[in-house]
C-alpha cells in the first residue's frame, strides 16, 4: 500500500489528472480521490489543468 501512496503523491505533484492516476494504479477515480483526501494530497489544482 505504501508504494501506491507514493505513486499517487508523485503523480499528483507532477500534475497528472485523477483519471490518469486511477488508470495507472488500476483503481477507480473515486478511490484515488478518497485516498488523496485521506492523506492530504491536493488534487484540486490538478483538475483545472485539462487541455483541450
Image (cartoon, helix red, strand yellow):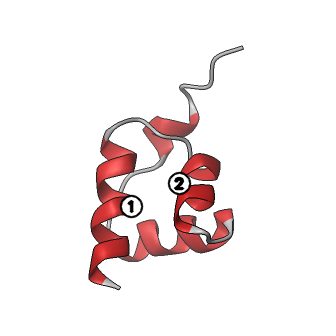
Q: Residue at x 46, y 74 (%)?
A: 35
Q: Nearer the viewer, residue 33 or 24?
A: 24
Task: Identify the secondary structure beneath mark 2.
Answer: helix
Q: Quadrant of residue 33?
A: bottom right
Q: Residue at x 57, y 38 (%)?
A: 47
Q: Residue at x 46, y 49 (%)?
A: 43
Give the image location of residue 23, x and y in percent.
Answer: 63, 57
Tell me, for residue 8, which label it has, or none: 1
Residue at the extreme right of the image, as rendered: 52
Instruction: Please state, as top left, top right, bottom left or bottom right, where the N terminus lies in the image.
Output: bottom left
Task: For label 2, count other residues whose C-alpha is less than 10 Å away and answer few (under 14), some (14-19) or many (20+).
Answer: many
Q: Quadrant of residue 28?
A: bottom right
Q: Quadrant of residue 22?
A: bottom right
Give the image location of residue 50, x and y in percent.
Answer: 62, 25
Q: Marks 2 and 1: in contact by CB < 8 Å?
A: yes
Q: Is residue 22 left or right of residue 37?
A: right
Task: For label 1, count other residues whose C-alpha is less than 10 Å away and answer few (under 14), some (14-19) or many (20+).
Answer: many
How many numbered marks, from 0 up? 2
In three-dimensional space, the C-alpha distance between marks 1 and 2, rounded to whole angstroms, equals: 7 Å
Give the image location of residue 52, x and y in percent.
Answer: 72, 14
Task: Identify the secondary structure beneath mark 1.
Answer: helix
Q: Is residue 26 left or right of residue 2?
A: right
Residue at the extreme top of the image, as rendered: 52
Residue picked out by circle 2: 21
Q: Is residue 15 above or below residue 43?
A: above
Q: Nearer the viewer, residue 8 or 43?
A: 8
Give the image location of residue 34, x and y in percent.
Answer: 54, 73
Q: Earlier in the sequence, mark 1 or mark 2?
A: 1
Tell me, for residue 33, which label it has, or none: none
Q: Residue at x 34, y 37 (%)?
A: 14
Q: Is residue 5 above or below residue 47?
A: below
Amino acid at each position: 500500500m505504501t508504494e501506491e501512496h507514493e505513486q499517487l503523491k508523485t503523480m499528483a505533484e507532477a500534475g497528472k489528472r485523477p483519471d490518469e492516476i486511477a488508470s495507472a494504479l488500476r483503481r477507480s477515480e473515486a478511490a484515488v480521490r478518497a485516498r488523496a483526501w485521506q492523506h492530504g494530497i491536493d488534487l484540486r489544482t490538478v483538475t483545472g489543468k485539462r487541455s483541450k
